[in-house]
Image (spheres, coloured by chain):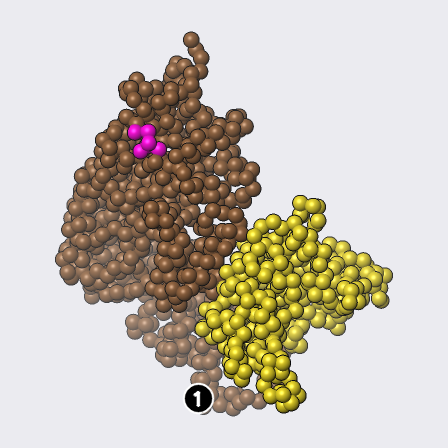
């Protein structure tokens, strides 16, 4: 299967060339089972240029130290917990680190309220179980178990969405590095290189607080929202251009000016005050993350490509903005209207955006 | 022949980074190897006389030098346990080798223009404080303005060339972690030589002068001894010392420098002051970390011990931090160091590992670790034998007797003034305050009775400068405070100043000063023509009267003064409120309020009456400003001197003459929303007056009321509103209106009224 034929190729497929170049150029010692040295992993994530001229695109824009601490944690075979508000690239970072370290980012357990222990530990192939009785052949290994056997990185998405008792089944795995199967009287012992990257967000409703016994077994890295407007603009424009390519949108990559407007609106509403600090704003209930800003721009591109002339204008952005900001019909609509009147209207060069948003709000 | 001569072989130049533990190790090892006959250290030669006291000191300490004629011109040269200069002094002392400071004399550096003598926050106006051999902005922005500043950061430049973003880290990697300190000196000298060549044009005149002085002193040392000489100086100066130009050139450069008599002493210093965080021009960010590195260098367990201490800090605050976590933290720090290609974990690695492992990514507990370990507050000690000014010695004696140890951390204390020791303590703190040494700050957040005081004690090293300044006022704390207070009283020109001086004198319990302040008060009162000024002095005085008995001053004496002021102020009050502008009216209200409090607190029966008469005549004065009049009416009504009917009449009258009416109502109800809600009598009076107004009168009064009530906070207004509703519901008259139903008729009437008002407005 080529990467062209799937909607969203995994990181190790999409960046196979970069990973291969990095591994080839890498002459530093590699921890057991690692595809490349920790330094090369950091370079893969943050981007750079190799000695042979290969350009590594940056996957994560942010503090180098955070990435180094994250990778350093995996070197010490400790589990890594990435925490942050929604849309701060937790899963994104986790996927890319896993792809670089073990060449496989697909050993994922998605945490939901319905995640059970068998998804974390192991399940059974019942037909076989009944036919042959308990045997290793009837065992269905979870992604975590597979990772333990091969010494790879297992990813746990949204750890705190799992019920607390399911979360706690990680305690043995993380501290003993074994997974007992009492039915067969065996235990799966982890191969060196096995580790876990979990993500959790600390803002959403409907999460189950992690027990402190489990929290102690993780090194925690908090991913902050982009520090400056410029950094965020860079992320949004780069990602939406990439996405546009992947989705084969007919539109041109957006002008930097449009991206900057979206980012500024998001930042101002998120911080509850305007850039110049002069006006106090109502904060909408949504998280208004960078990820949502990216999706506003890509949906604008889609609209422009299919229904417009291919370049993004205020009209294409307006409906996306409305959808991103207004999560709660009553209070968010009020906040949005207030923002339009108090801020957007006052900015002379934003006239088009004001009119378009007015029309969208109705 | 006038040629540059290379420095003789027997001189060993040790280029250091001030306060760098690696440099300190290098110096210690080099001295052991070279075994010099004399050691020269960067610092002012005037400090030589104080060097014999080194064994009596516990670092961090600072050399304090000040101009004898003008003690506020002072500078500190701080040394920590891990300062290379300190190691050199210790070594010389232990081996009986003479040691000298060989920089430009302090007489010259202190005389440089534009250092602000009265800003204790910036005493470190000295190269001695620089962390890395005079890195950029050498004087923390305080240098002489007419000299071209070296806009240059030698370490930053080198670090940048090496690909580091932070010069501190670079130095830490290349120097502090270097395992063999002895051959470092040569490498540092070479690097600095190259740098100096490149930036030759950016070396300022002051640095050149200092280096000329250094070379002169090296020449002198060469003459004095036959054997090896060790020179400890900031790395930046090393290239300038490697060759000796003809002595006459340096002598010319040093010609005409100011000569002054300089005296000085050793003072305790603190890690907090070493850290750049406290606004200390250019300091080191992590004195605690450096001290830790220094202490652990012998044992080689710096990183594990660091995490053990971090765990202890967190546990002391009841935060979870297990030994198992410490183990993981050490592993992560090692992994990070390896990934970054560093020889061993540095401060950034241990802090990042602490954050990820020990603090669960939360920056709040990490701040604790930063405060207690990275800065690691520590106060040095200075032995008893170190010469100080008689005043400082007296203070030390008092501290010991009263058991008030100095501490670099703020510490609250409580004093019971009925106990002798506590009273003495309070006296000492107040006297020091007079001397501009605010060691204790009165803690007014906790109101205590007459006999108890709360203070916040926080000793700051810069107080030593203030002490040196105060030393000329007397040889003991008491004598110095007396001089300052008596002089201050003599200079007082306004009643308020004299009253303040009096209350300070009473607090300090210095009878001569009390007498002087009394005289000053009489003198100022006699000259004062403004009744408000007289009255404004009353609150201060009243408090003094109250505390006088505890303070060993005869309260009667003070009461007489109070009465004198009150009598004269009372007579002048009504006139002072006539035909005045808004600002004066504000002052008048404050004076009336303060004076009323003072009268209730301290005046006798006779003078209470005097005050009441004054208020009455103010109320009766037809053209007095409404604000104080309203206030006076209210005060009179509260004491029962006028009854509610009269108040209602007064309110009516005030509103009937439109001008000044707002002021009257404002003055009457102002600042008392809670009183208005709570006091049913007061509420009744206002309510009765309001409901008694005819329709037209009410309309006329409405804007005034709105403005008076507008000063209340929203919470107070809501409280007041609830109260009105409560009365209305409870009263017989308004029962029907208080239903929750929408009253169409009422609404229509209201709308009509609003329309009328708007029409009138346009």
Q: According to the colouring, which chain is yellow?
A: A
Please indicate whether residue B19 sits to the left or right of residue B224 in the image: right
Front residue (pair A305, B654): A305
Q: B26 left or right of B58?
A: right
Provide residue B332's location: percent of width, then percent of height.
Answer: 48, 58
- Which residue lies at the image location 53% right of the left edge and 49% below the top edge? B340
Residue B274, image x and y in percent?
Answer: 37, 44
The spot of residue B4 in percent (x, y) is: 44, 15
Q: Secondary structure at mark 1?
A: helix
Image location (x, y in percent) of residue A308: 84, 64
Looking at the image, the residue that sits furthest to the top is B1
Q: Is residue B735 left or right of residue A108?
A: left
Which quadrant would the N terminus of chain B be assigned to in this image?
top left
Give the quarter of the image for residue A200: bottom right
Residue beneath the point at 74% across and 62% down: A243
- Chain assigned brown: B
Total count of labels: 1
Asked if one can make out residue B73 in the rendered structure from this viewpoint, the answer is no
Would you call the spot at circle 1 few (<14 residues within 10 Å), some (14-19), or many (20 or more)? few
Q: Residue at x 43, y 11 (%)?
A: B2
Q: Quadrant of residue B598?
A: bottom left
Q: Is B15 part of what is drawn in magenta?
A: no
Q: What's drawn in magenta, residue-wise?
A: B30-35
Camera-nearest residue between B324 and A110: B324
Q: Write down the chain letter for disc 1.
A: B
The residue positioned 45% from the left and 90% from the top of the image is B732
Task: Decide if residue B191 is in sight here.
Answer: yes
What residue is disc 1 on? B730
* Residue in front for this viewpoint, A242 or B271: A242
Quarter location, residue A101: bottom right
């Amino acid at each position: 299967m080529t990467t062209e034929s799937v909607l969203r190729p995994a990181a190790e497929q999409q960046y196979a060339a970069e990973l291969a170049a990095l591994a080839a150029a890498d002459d530093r010692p590699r921890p057991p089972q690692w595809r490349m040295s920790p330094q090369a992993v950091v370079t893969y994530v943050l981007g750079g240029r190799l000695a042979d001229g290969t350009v590594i695109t940056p996957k994560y824009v942010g503090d180098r130290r955070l990435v180094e601490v994250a990778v350093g944690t995996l070197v010490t075979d400790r589990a890594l917990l990435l925490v942050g508000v929604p849309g701060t690239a937790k899963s994104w970072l986790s996927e890319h680190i896993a792809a670089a370290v073990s060449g496989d980012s697909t050993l994922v357990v998605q945490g939901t309220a319905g995640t059970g222990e068998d998804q974390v530990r192991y399940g059974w192939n019942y037909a076989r179980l009944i036919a042959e009785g308990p045997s290793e052949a009837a065992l269905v290994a979870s992604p975590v178990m597979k990772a333990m056997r091969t010494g790879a990185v297992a990813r746990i998405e949204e750890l705190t969405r799992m019920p607390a008792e399911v979360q706690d089944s990680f305690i043995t795995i993380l501290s003993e590095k074994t997974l007992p199967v009492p039915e067969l009287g065996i235990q799966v012992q982890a191969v060196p290189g096995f580790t876990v990257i979990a993500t959790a967000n600390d803002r959403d409703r409907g999460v189950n607080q992690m027990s402190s016994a489990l929290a102690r077994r993780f090194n925690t890295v908090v991913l902050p929202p982009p520090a400056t407007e410029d950094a965020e603009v860079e992320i949004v424009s780069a990602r939406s251009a990439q996405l546009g390519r992947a989705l084969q949108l007919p539109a041109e990559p957006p002008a930097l000016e449009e991206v900057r407007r979206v980012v500024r609106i998001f930042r101002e509403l998120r911080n509850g005050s305007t850039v110049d600090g002069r006006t106090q704003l109502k904060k909408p209930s949504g998280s208004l993350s960078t990820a949502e800003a990216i999706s506003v721009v890509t949906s604008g591109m889609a609209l422009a490509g299919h229904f417009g002339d291919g370049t993004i204008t205020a009209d294409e952005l307006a409906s996306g903005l409305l959808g991103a900001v207004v999560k709660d019909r009553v209070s968010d609509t009020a906040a949005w209207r207030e923002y339009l009147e108090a801020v957007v209207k006052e900015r002379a060069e934003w006239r088009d955006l004001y009119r378009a948003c007015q029309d969208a709000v109705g | 022949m006038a040629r540059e001569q290379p420095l003789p072989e027997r001189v060993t130049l040790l280029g250091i980074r001030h306060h760098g533990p690696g440099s300190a190790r290098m110096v210690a090892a080099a001295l052991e190897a070279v075994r010099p006959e004399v050691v020269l250290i960067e610092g002012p030669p005037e400090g030589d006389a104080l060097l014999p006291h080194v064994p009596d000191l516990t670092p961090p300490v600072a050399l304090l030098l000040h101009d004898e004629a003008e003690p506020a011109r002072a500078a500190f040269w701080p040394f920590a346990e891990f300062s290379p200069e300190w190691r050199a002094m210790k070594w010389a002392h232990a081996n009986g080798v003479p040691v000298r400071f060989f920089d430009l004399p302090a007489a010259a550096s202190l005389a440089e223009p534009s250092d602000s003598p009265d800003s204790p926050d910036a005493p470190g106006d000295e190269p001695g404080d620089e962390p890395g051999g005079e890195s950029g902005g050498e004087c923390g922005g305080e240098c002489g303005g007419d000299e071209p500043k070296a806009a240059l950061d030698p370490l930053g430049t080198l670090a940048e060339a090496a690909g580091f973003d932070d010069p501190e880290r670079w130095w830490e990697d290349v120097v502090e972690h270097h395992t063999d300190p002895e051959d470092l000196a040569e490498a540092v000298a070479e690097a600095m030589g190259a740098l100096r060549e490149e930036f030759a044009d950016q070396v300022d005149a002051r640095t050149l002068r200092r280096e000329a002085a250094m070379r002169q002193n090296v020449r002198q040392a060469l003459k004095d001894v036959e054997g090896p000489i060790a020179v400890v100086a900031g790395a930046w100066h090393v290239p300038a010392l490697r060759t000796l130009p003809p002595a006459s050139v340096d002598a010319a450069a040093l010609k005409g420098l100011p000569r002054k008599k300089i005296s000085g002493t050793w003072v305790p210093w603190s890690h907090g002051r070493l850290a750049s965080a406290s606004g200390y021009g250019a300091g080191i960010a992590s004195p605690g970390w450096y001290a830790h590195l220094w202490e652990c260098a012998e044992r080689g367990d710096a990183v594990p011990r660091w995490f053990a201490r971090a765990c202890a800090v967190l546990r002391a605050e009841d935060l979870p931090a297990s030994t198992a976590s410490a183990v993981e933290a050490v592993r992560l720090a090692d992994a990070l160091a390896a990934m970054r290609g560093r020889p061993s974990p540095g401060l950034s690695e241990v802090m990042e590992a602490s954050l990820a492992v020990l603090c669960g990514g939360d920056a709040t507990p990490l701040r604790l670790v930063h405060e207690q370990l990275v800065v690691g507050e520590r106060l040095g000690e200075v032995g008893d034998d170190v010469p100080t000014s008689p005043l400082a010695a007296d203070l030390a004696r008092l501290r010991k007797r009263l058991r008030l140890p100095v501490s670099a951390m703020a510490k609250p204390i409580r004093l019971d003034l009925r106990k002798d020791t506590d009273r003495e303590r309070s006296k000492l703190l107040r006297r020091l305050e007079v001397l501009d040494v605010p060691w204790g700050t009165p803690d007014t957040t906790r109101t205590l009775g007459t006999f108890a005081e709360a203070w916040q004690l926080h000793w700051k090293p810069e107080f030593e400068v203030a002490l040196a300044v105060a030393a000329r006022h007397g040889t003991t704390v008491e004598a110095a405070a007396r001089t300052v207070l008596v002089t201050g009283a003599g200079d007082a020109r306004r009643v308020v100043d004299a009253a303040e001086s009096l209350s300070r004198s009473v607090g300090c319990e210095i009878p001569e000063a009390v007498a002087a302040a009394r005289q000053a008060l009489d003198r100022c009162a006699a000259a004062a023509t403004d009744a408000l000024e007289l009255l404004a002095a009353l609150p201060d005085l009243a408090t003094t009267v109250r505390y006088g008995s505890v303070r060993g001053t005869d309260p009667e004496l003070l009461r007489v003064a109070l009465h004198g002021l009150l009598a004269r102020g009372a007579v002048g009050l009504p006139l002072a409120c006539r035909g005045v502008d808004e600002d004066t009216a504000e002052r008048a209200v404050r004076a009336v309020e303060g004076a009323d409090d003072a009268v209730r607190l301290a005046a006798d029966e006779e003078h209470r009456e005097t005050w009441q008469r004054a208020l009455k005549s103010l109320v009766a004065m037809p053209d007095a400003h409404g604000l104080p009049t309203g206030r006076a009416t209210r005060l009179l009504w509260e004491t029962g001197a006028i009854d509610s009917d009269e108040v209602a009449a007064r309110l009516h009258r005030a509103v009937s003459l439109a001008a000044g009416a707002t002021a009257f109502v404002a003055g009457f109800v102002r600042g008392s929303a809670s009183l208005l809600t709570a006091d049913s009598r007061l509420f009744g009076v206002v309510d009765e007056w309001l409901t008694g107004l005819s329709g037209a009168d009410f309309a006329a009064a409405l804007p005034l009321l709105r403005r008076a009530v507008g000063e209340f906070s929203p919470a107070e207004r809501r409280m007041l509103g609830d109260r009105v509703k409560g009365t209305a519901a409870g009263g017989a008259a308004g029962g029907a209106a208080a239903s929750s139903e929408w009253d169409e008729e009422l609404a229509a009437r209201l709308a009509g009224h609003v329309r009328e008002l708007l029409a009138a407005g346009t």
